Amino acid sequence: MSEVVHVPEGARYELRRDGRAVGRMDYVQQGETLVVTHTEVSPALRGRGLGDVLVRGALDDVRARGLRVRPLCWFVRDLMQARPEYRDLLSDRDRTALGLDGGS
């Protein structure tokens, strides 16, 4: 079973399977925005959709905490472009930079 865990002291979200970290999404907090800098999944587990599980779980937590996201990581940026349900987490400036119109 997989779970996404926020590790604020490490400025990251982890994807854990059977209690062991198998993926991470690193960020730098700037005010009310998490600037996502890097995402990775253990090489042996890549290609199984675990990156999506990690990022979606992290973004759901970010929303629940009332924060925004600036996706510098290409993987997070691509997921947010492909999934309109997460575009509201972007600032207007980031939506414009990504070529998205007002989050729709």
Image: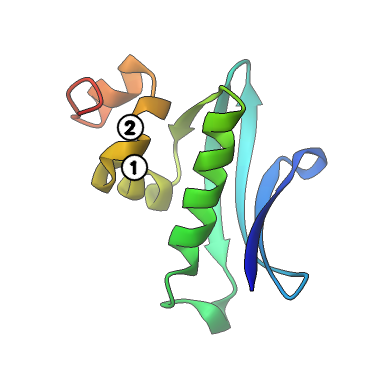
The answer to whether residue 48 is above or below residue 77 is below
Q: Position of residue 1 (x, y in %)?
A: 64, 74
**Horizontal and vertical percent for residue 44?**
56, 84
Q: Give left or right: position of 65 versus 92.
A: right
Of the residues shown, which amino acid type is indicated by label 1? Met
Q: Secondary structure at mark 1?
A: helix
Note whether 5 is above or below 68 in the view shown. below
Q: State which quadrant residue 16 falls in.
A: bottom right
Q: Name which residue lies at 33% across and 32% down.
A: 87
**Residue at the spot 42% in from the left edge and 47% down from the top edge:** 76
Q: Residues within 10 Å of mark 1 (few under 14, many from 20)?
A: many
Three-letter amino acid code of the residue under disc 2: Arg
Image position, residue 41 (x, y; %):
56, 68
Question: Label 2: how many residues lie within 10 Å, few (<14), some (14-19) or many (20+)?
Answer: many
Give the residue drawn at x 56%, y 22%.
66
Q: Residue at x 47, y 50 (%)?
A: 56
For the residues bearing labels 1 and 2, Cβ distance under 8 angstroms: yes
Q: Which residue is mark 2?
A: 87
Tag 2 or tag 1, which sits nearer the N-term?
Answer: 1
From the viewer's perspective, tell me whether residue 6 is left or right of residue 52. Answer: right
Q: Which residue is mark 1?
A: 80
- Residue most extreme to the right: 9
Q: CA distance from mark 1 to mark 2?
A: 6 Å
Q: How many marks?
A: 2
Q: Position of residue 71 (x, y in %)?
A: 43, 37
The secondary structure type at the circle numbered 2 is: helix
Which quadrant, please, contains the C terminus? top left
Q: Which mark is residue 92?
A: none
